[in-house]
Image: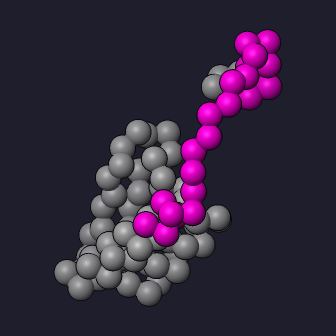
Amino acid sequence: MCHPFIIGPFNETINQMIAETKARINFPPASVTKDELIIPAEKEAVAKGLGRIQNIYEERKRNCQSICAEVPKNQHECIIRPRG
């Protein structure tokens, strides 16, 4: 699930991409665990948008990493708030 990293802070990256390509780019909501997106537009706009998204993804993939951290059970409530 890397949609937030592609969309950018305050949707800046995706809004810029939409303005440049003239294609609507629809990402699923963050609450949904799907990795698919929809780009309804003409072929050229879809190709431009998809290429740009793939470039952003590859760049983020090179710059980001995962870490594992153990949290004592009595501190779980500090990380996971009520209602998830």
Image side of residue 65 versus residue 51, left or right = right
Please, is residue 66 above or below residue 44 in the view? above
**Is residue 68 on the magenta stretch?**
yes
Residue nearer the viewer, 50 or 63: 63
Residue 44, by quadrant, is: bottom left
Q: Residue at x 57, y 51 (%)?
A: 65
- How far from the left and from the top, in percent, is residue 64? 57, 57
- Is 38 situated left or right of 65 in this image? left
Q: Residue at x 44, y 87 (%)?
A: 20
Residue closer to the observer: 13 or 67: 67
Specify the quadrant that holds the C terminus: top right
The reply to whether residue 20 is visible in this rendering is yes
The residues colored magenta run 58-79
For the point 60% across and 72% down, the residue is: 12
Residue at 52 percent across and 80 percent down: it is 16
Furthest residue to the left?
Answer: 43
- Residue 68 lies in what quarter of the image? top right
